[in-house]
Amino acid sequence: MTAALRALPRPDEPDDATLVAAVRAGDDAAFSALYRRHARAVAGRVYRLLGHDAALDDIVQETFVHGLRSLARLEEPAALRGWLLTIAVRRTHRHLAKCYRSRELSDALRDVQPRVGDARARDEVHALYEALAKLPPKLRVPWVLHRIEGQTLPEVAEVCEVSLTSVKRFIKQADERLRRIHG
């Protein structure tokens, strides 16, 4: 039996339009039935667009979550599969664009990365960044902006959208943790 035939409702099962109406009325079982009926087709489309399955589950899940949230806008409930596939294509496109931008940025940053010629200094910088990786972002970002980038405390507070008092506290906490980590 082909996948297309497996996806068709059996005579004893309600069609998509009936299930969509039930979902709109709050029936979770109807949503589960629609998911079981269409998830394979959505996953297949996403897989073919990605060429791998690294983000497949996330995109399929996002597709159905978005579909459920915007089900009221579906004008023709019988066309649900095509509508879900369109959502999946758009979600996949966003994912691929994000990956592309990330790769471009990474390549650009590789050209401007600071080079440390002295092996001892390079080891110290590497150790510092390993220690910084252990800090939560709310401590790491203000610390790096102030201690490495040289921004003033008021500038850091503005960029981080927190009070000056919070910035001072975060930097002090980061200093203490880095002393414990880095020795």
Image (cartoon, helix red, strand yellow):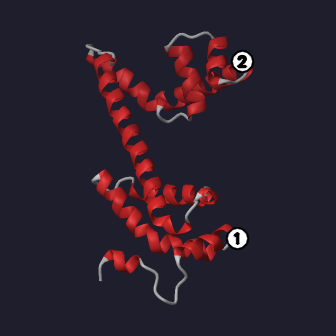
Instruction: Give the camera-side residue of 57 and 41.
Output: 41
Local SS, label 1: loop
Residue 83 in the image: state x and y as whole percent.
Answer: 48, 59
Q: Please tell me how many numbered marks the rendered image carries.
A: 2
Above or below residue 112? Residue 5 is below
How crowded pointer 2 is (Cα within 10 Å; few <14, some 14-19, many 20+) is rated as some
Identify the residue at image location x=33%, y=75%. 3
Which mark, by number, is residue 164? 2
> Picture coordinates of residue 173 (x, y %)?
63, 27
Q: Is residue 123 left or right of residue 38?
A: left
Dot label at residue 38: none
Q: Does label 1 or label 2 sit earlier along the sequence?
A: 1
Name the residue located 61 percent from the left edge and 77 percent from the top edge: 29
The vertical placement of 37 against 176, above or below, is below
In this figure, which residue is indicated by the disc labeled 1? 25
The residue drawn where x is 46% and y is 31% is: 131
The residue that appears at 52% across and 90% down in the rendered structure is 12
Query: Residue 11 appears at what percent x and percent y?
Result: 48, 89
